[in-house]
Image (tube, grey):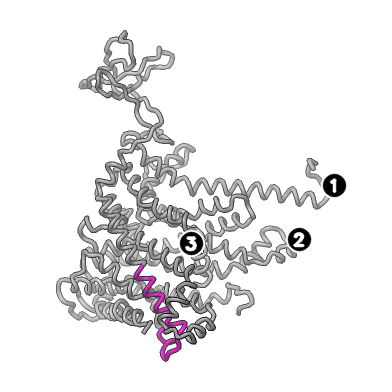
Amino acid sequence: MFCSPAILGLLAFTLYPALASLYYSFCNYPMLKPPVWVGTANYRTLFHDPVFYKSLSNTAYYAVFATPLGMIVAFLLALLLNQKVKGLAVFRTMFFVPSIVPMVAGSVLWLWLLNPQYGLINTLLRSVGFPEPGWMADPAWAKPALIVMSAWGIGGWMLVYLAGLQDVPRDLYEAAEIDGANLLQRARHITIPFMSPHLFFTLVMGFIGAAQYFTQAYVMTNGMGGPVDSTKFFSLYLFQNAFQYWKMGYACAMAWILFIVILLFTLLLFKTSARYVYYGGER
Amino acid sequence: MAASVNAGMPAGSRARLRKRALRGATYAALVILGTAFTLPFFWLLSTSFKPADRIQHWPPDIIPMRQVTTNIDGEIRRVYSVKRPAGARAVPAVTIIKRLPGNRAVVYPAGRGFTVRPATVNADDLEPVVKPGITWSNYTRGLVFIPFFRQLRNTLIISVVSVLGTLISCSLVAYGLSRIEWRGRNTLFLVLLSVMMLPYQVVMAPLFAVFVKLGWVDTFLPLTVPTFFGNVFFIFLLRQFFMTIPRDLSEAAKLDGCSEFDIYRRVILPLAKPALAMVGLWTFMGAWNDFLGPLIYLVDEANYTLSLGLAMFLGQYGSEYGMLMAVSTVVTIPIIVLFFFTQRTFIQGITLTGIKG
């Protein structure tokens, strides 16, 4: 009886829509008319759709750069904060607060910071004589712009790492120091292994998040994914198909491909994780 | 202590020196990175308080500036200075009386003492005279431009109802999954867990079709009603928390004649306050920040949430940076205030899910 909301919710908001979605993915479904079975036509069209491949490669680009960059920045911040610094709370707040800024507000802010002519970032670059990228106005720089922006909102991962660092046994460092291990060796042989579950967790979350990256790209390009499709990420193209072109069947086919990609990727990461993730005494 | 570094120095003292250098480097890095992370906020606020004519000015004003004005015969006039070749006599501040064709302007001294006669100068040589000062017009105009208070109300309604729905449904389900034994319990739990993997995009289109049939599009219902049917992630979190509450408490309550619902309400919920606070906080933040949901379901501007309203405002008036920054500021501030009041819940929540997730 207590679980009835979950069972109802599961049926109404997940199971039924998931099955319907699978069915629609084999249909021509322009929303206003009822769905018509077309077999694998949607999938066949997808595999010949250049924009589909573009959106896949954009998403892969974002995932491959944004996730490791975020992990490195967050790890560096956590390491710095773990040095028993004075004013820890102040610094921690400074690094964390950007991550809770509403995504739309953050996107609007960064669009202004990245403005090629008047933005703060190019102003700073100009004053030290560096070249000034066009950022969101330049197809070559739009994705790097979004990746830089993503590193600003990495505070949550920093907290995850910080909590993990506090669990690394102190005496190991002392023992290593006595044995003459330098800073890098200690990081390589103590910190990284002990932190590997946290790093692994953020890696998985980062990839899943990147696969569904949508809001910032939508807001900053007014829903277009421009310039020249350079920020047309998978989820953005999916949304366009569903709610701008009203090709629901096509969008559902994309959604199932997305699900399968995420599933395979997560499985792959978990299968290989035994090799590089160290779970203390648990396993 | 102040000995120079040399080979004859005792090892302990050298290590101490190195440690001190490392500490210095740590603080330097923290200050540099802290500045880099804070600068965008500073720029957000600074821009939001600048008048339109100073926002796209080169070099940019670091703190908000505004043009000096003067009152001449009851009329407020902007004050300029006239650029002159180096070494020339300084010219007092002037105001523009009349613009002439060919980029010329007739100017008049702005100060008192009408000893200098009106002069005609090249308009390019006029430079606004500015002083630090805050301009509120971005806020007063921006908050009217989008129906801000209406959208704030919408956002609050959706967020608060979502929090209520999530807290009620998730705690009930988590209770059923953790404190009561029944057949099929573990199966349901496993099914719920596997559902966590399903991306929203998969169910997005069919759900939309359902809500269209129900006539719920452009109402808050598609955004709030599902929260009353549980959220797998939060159910999972609460279940883990409920499992840690000793069984003896339930047994004792049962002996006192409590029903399962009494136990849930009087024993478990009060003990689970920290976990519930965390779930409530996150649901609130999620609803406040949500963009995709409102984008799909809300059509009329009067029904928009703040996030959607801000995005639409950006789409229409992308170059009104002053107003955009003002609206972004007021959308962000409630969340930051909320963070400062609930910091501990927040940080515990993230580290907890980070490890258990």
Q: CA distance from mark 3 to mark 1?
A: 52 Å
Q: Marks 1 and 2: CB-CB under 8 Å? A: no
Question: Position of B31 compared to B19: left or right?
Answer: left
> Label 3 sits on what residue type?
Phe
Q: Measured along the vertical axis of the image, is residue B111 above or below residue A165?
A: above
Of marks 3 and 2, the one in the foreground: 3
- Point out residue B70 in the picture as x, y percentages from the top left corner: 31, 22
What residue is pinned by disc 2?
A: A180
Residue A165 is at least partly visible in this image? yes
Residue shown at 22%/63% (left/top)?
Answer: A244
Q: Which residue is mark 3?
A: B346
**Left or right, residue A78 beside residue B87:** right
Q: x and y percent of residue B201 in the render?
A: 32, 70
Q: Are marks 3 and 2 on the same chain?
A: no
Mark 2, residues whose alpha carbon is within 10 Å: few (<14), some, or many (≥20)? few
A261 shown above or below B58: below
> Which label belongs to residue B169?
none
Magenta residues span B164-188
Q: Quadrant of the C terminus of chain A?
A: bottom right
Q: Secondary structure at mark 3?
A: helix
Label 2 marks which chain's residue?
A: A
Residue B8 is marked as 1
Residue at image coords 56%, 55%: A77
* SS for callout 1: loop
